[in-house]
Amino acid sequence: MAAEMALVIPTIKCSSSTPKLCDSRATCSFSKFTIVKMTATSQPPKTTNPTKKVSKKAIKETLLAPRFYTTDFDEMETLFNTKINKNLNQAEFEALLQEFKTDYNQTHFVRNKEFKEAADKLQGPLRQIFVEFLERSCTAEFSGFLLYKELGRRLKKTNPVVAEIFSLMSRDEARHAGFLNKGLSDFNLALDLGFLTKARKYTFFKPKFIFYATYLSEKIGYWRYITIYRHLKNNPEYQCYPIFKYFENWCQDENRHGDFFSALMKAQPQFLNDWKAKLWARFFCLSVYVTMYLNDCQRTAFYEGIGLDTKEFDMHVIIETNRTTARIFPAVLDVENPEFKRKLQRMVEINQKLIAIGEAEDIPLVKNLKRIPLITAMASELLAAYLMPPIESGSVDFDEYDPQFVY
């Protein structure tokens, strides 16, 4: 994954301007909607007549695009077999199951006329970048739905309690994806999620890597959502689209999902209590943090549009996620060390040069030759960040989770 991140060839330039710092698919059209069969990195079709059939267009993916994941389901069944694994705390899982069954957000995602009215007011570059935000977010949520749904199905006989929790989490992710996709309809677009299910390539992760990566993605999702919500609550003049008003309750779904993965890891102490676990924990922290940072620096216009400084926002999210993660991971990165932020900035600069090479009119051979020193430099920065002295953390015996820690 680190090698892949070093080969990123993004498609959108970073903006050099910064606002005032604020607190912390091939396509076919039907009627007025365009059903978009694409990845979340695509651009909506340009057409002046929404009822006219648009031409098909090949969509270019990037390595930073949201992915779909699969795993070794047989190993998962072994891990959660109560006859084999005596570390499973079924009482804790039962309590978590009741929490998910309560379904606090069952009636939360209710749209109103504000959505379409706000979408019609969004024009120009901000409209375009906002559509991409909805596409990427919808694809990411749908990815979680697919993985959790399959885990719920496969674990039904082995561990019905854990299986039902996975099924209920897939319910949450489906609800999020549907709400985001409905938001796209305000812009006369819609992701064809059935097409994505069949067309997207799936990335294989071993179960323990699924635990690390998914825990981080859920917790970082929490901090992103709650930070945006609080900022817009304090700065309502930047409230350009009503979906952000839903983030306060929405992010609690992400928080509960992360808590569940924390319990799963505690039930598998071999994933937390040796030197290999420390190396993998740091690796996944670095992968998730760098991916978010590079992604967001390609979409500065979106964050500027809602009154946020992209880099300050990202560092706040990274620091808070890292503090939360330190409660369960055996080691985390020292992200509050100023040198870590300097390394991230150097990666952004290298990424910008890679973008420029990709947009140049040179022949492919010349482009690849120009990329070699930049890819080497990116890999060097990643390795240097990984080798920074870590923070020893985590414990499989820590106290019951206190929600006030993150909210």
Image (spheres, rainbow, N blue to C red):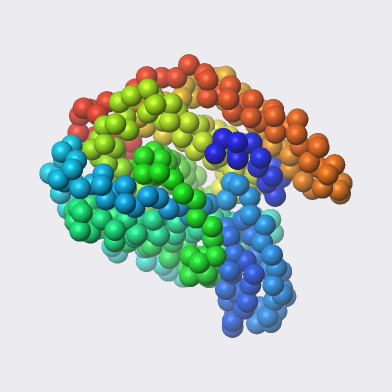
Residue displayed at 58% across by 21% down: 384
Foreground of the two, 96 or 203: 203
Identity of the residue furthest to the top in this view: 389
Q: Is residue 55 visible?
A: yes
Identity of the residue furthest to the right in this view: 362
Which quadrant of the view contains residue 405?
top left
Residue displayed at 68% across by 46% down: 10
In the image: residue 161, left or right of residue 235: left
261 relative to 70, above or below: above
Percent x, y of residue 344? 60, 29
102 relative to 275, above or below: below
Q: Is residue 304 visible?
A: no
Foreground of the two, 50 or 289: 289
Residue displayed at 34% across by 59% down: 150
- For the C terminus, the quadrant is top left
Residue displayed at 66% across by 31% down: 378
- For the N terminus, the quadrant is top right
Identity of the residue furthest to the left in this view: 91
Percent x, y of residue 210? 39, 44
Percent x, y of residue 86? 15, 38
Foreground of the two, 388 or 183: 388
How many numbered badges does the structure rendering display? 0
Percent x, y of residue 49? 70, 79
Which quadrant of the view contains residue 377?
top right
